[in-house]
Amino acid sequence: MTQTVEQVGRPPVRRAPRRLPYLVRQLITLLVTLFAITIVIFGLTAIAGDPARDILGQYATDAQVTAFQQIHGLDQPIVVRYLEWLGGIFRGDLGISYQSNGPVWDVISPRLGPSIVLVLFSWLLTVVISVPIGLYSGVRLRGHRDAAVTFVTLIVAAFPEFVLGLILAIVLGVWLAWLPVDSTAVSMGGLFDSPSAYVLPGITIALGTIPYIIRLMRANAREVASETYVRAAVLRGVTEPSLSLRHILPNAAPPVVTALGLQFAGLIGGVVVAETLFGFPGMGQLLAQSAASRDAPVVEALALMIGAVFVVANLAADAIVVYVTPKLRDAVR
Amino acid sequence: MTADVLNTVTAADVAAPRQRRWRGFLAIPQGGFGVALLLLLLLLVVIGPFIAPDSPNEISDQPILGPSAQHWLGTDAYGRDILSRVLHGGASVILLPLLAVSLAMVVATLVGLLSGYLGGKVDSVVTWVINIALAIPSYLAVLVVVAAFGGGGAVVVTAVAVVYAPYITRVIRSATQAIAPREFVLAARARGESLGWILFREITPNIGPTLLVEIALRFTYAIMFIASLSFLGLGVQPPSSNWGVMVAQNRALLLVSPVGVLVPALLIGVLAIAVNLIADALTQFFGDRIHERLMV
């Protein structure tokens, strides 16, 4: 009683509605997301109410409170404040800090360079360490050694960054005294004058993402390695390292590329924690300090900048994946 | 978004409820080891306050001592006995994340079941909100909340719950979608069962294992996240002897007495490892693949 395809009839072919080109759609998503982020960031601070009393302390006079509200535009209706804030961003005016009473940009700008260098360093570290280990353990390792890799990544992944950083600081900084446990030196002199101050925070941030990427790379490499075309390549006499690098890696890479883009989110937490732990004068430390001292304008500006980088990185990773994967390239058209 | 083409979840990915005994769970190395570690830590946290030699906030005139017979882990900058503080400080490290995850689970289960089962407009709206929420990094959202409302345990718990809810909703929605077309759900509909019955008596038991894995995973993340926030000075406030707060305060003594920082830090690490091992074992035990598919 089994029916063949002919008896049932093919499902009616439904024409896909006309769609905008992929890149245009991605750009629209980008703008909508950024817009949503500005609303969330501003909305959260706005519904919290007037911070004047909390910032100035309970002994501030009414006149001081009123002056504070006027300087920061807190006496205006919320919609006006939002539009002014948004407009200011386009003019390069990020508002005035509650704590320093100077422009927010002056508080943030000296910290941009060190943080960018630190993030690029740790991101590079993540790629260089986790992709080869993941590929190798996925393709070559079996049994106990494979279990060992899995176990170590599980353990490292379960440690919060500040615990990992502390262990590194105690072993490499205090016991062996190879590296400085304090990175304040970065704020003095040029960006690259004290390279050793970048090492411990850089490794700490990278350790937060490395186990995750190793596991993903390993799982994908293993899946691809069992495909028929890989076995065909083996039969044709293709040997390592060409087998891993030319046949397995390109096919196992796409999800890893997406994840490396997504990992910017993981990096943000790592950057905040590692910079605070090692006294590194960057944006992450500023973000934590400003949140603790309730300096909303600084936190808003930093959150918007970092959020924008995160969204762009995600979409870039998405686009790269789509254009290197033939199956997806056709699917998104 | 685009890569969603890769993340389509099918019924085969949803962990199947099994009749196997829980002894089988403990036989998985991660499971047995994780449960043993967790029980040990719970024991320490529960009886700790009773066996602590001193009160956690008792200030003495002997600050910054290394380990000695009188103070096994030394004293901190205020002369407080570090061992006593460690023994007192575990409860909030476990309870705050537990509270945050429970809150998020309740909301996410309701929304996820509804949007996964009903589909249509409800689902479109929920998916849209989830996609926006996932585009905002967790740390940023929580830091903005703390800047707006001030730090402290209650604010951090609420913020973490709100930030985690979309992630959990996404998992539950996908699992529900995979189960909803199955025959027993159709049969319940044909019988004319109410929406509540279908959601909680037909679908929930079948996505139960997925829920359990999700709870364990989120609990791991929440432990690490909230401990980190306390370390940053945004969560539980001093003079609490919360392990995260202790690490932050004793960080300054790193060069003089590393033990005082290392012990509370390692305890947080061991707690996270224990729960993480349990989550890993649960994934294996139930054969859950949905988390791998959704890359969470």
Image (tube, coloured by chain):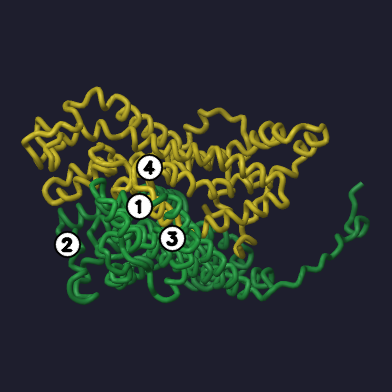
Q: Quadrant of residue B266?
A: top left
Crowd around label 3: few <14 · some 14–19 · many ≥20 (10 Å):
few
Chain whose colour in the figure is green: A
Spot occupied by residue B254 in the image (x, y as percentages of width and height):
16, 50
The residue carrying mark 3 is A76
Q: Which chain is yellow?
A: B
Q: Check if mark 1's residue and mark 4's residue have beta carbons within 8 Å.
A: no
CA distance for labels 4 and 2: 29 Å
Residue A51, numbered label: 1
As rendered, which of B50 and A142 lies closer to the eye? Answer: B50
Mark sitting on residue B272: 4
Q: Chain of mark 1?
A: A
Judge whether B44 appears above or below A93 on screen.
Answer: above
Residues behind callouts 3 and 2 on a single chain: yes
Q: Residue furthest left?
A: B61
Query: Which is more foreground, mark 4 or mark 3?
Result: 3
Q: Secondary structure at mark 3?
A: loop
Q: Judge the density around disc 4: few (<14), some (14-19), many (≥20) Cα neighbours within 10 Å.
A: many
Mark 4 near mark 3, Cβ–Cβ under 8 Å? no
Task: Please give the name of the residue rendered at 48% of the width and 49% of the height, measured from the top-left corner.
Answer: B163
Type of amino acid at the residue the image marks with label 3: Gln
Q: Which residue is mark 2?
A: A178
Instruction: Give the chain of mark 4.
Output: B
Q: Looking at the picture, which amino acid does disc 4 mark? A: Ala
x then y, percent, for residue B134: 52, 56
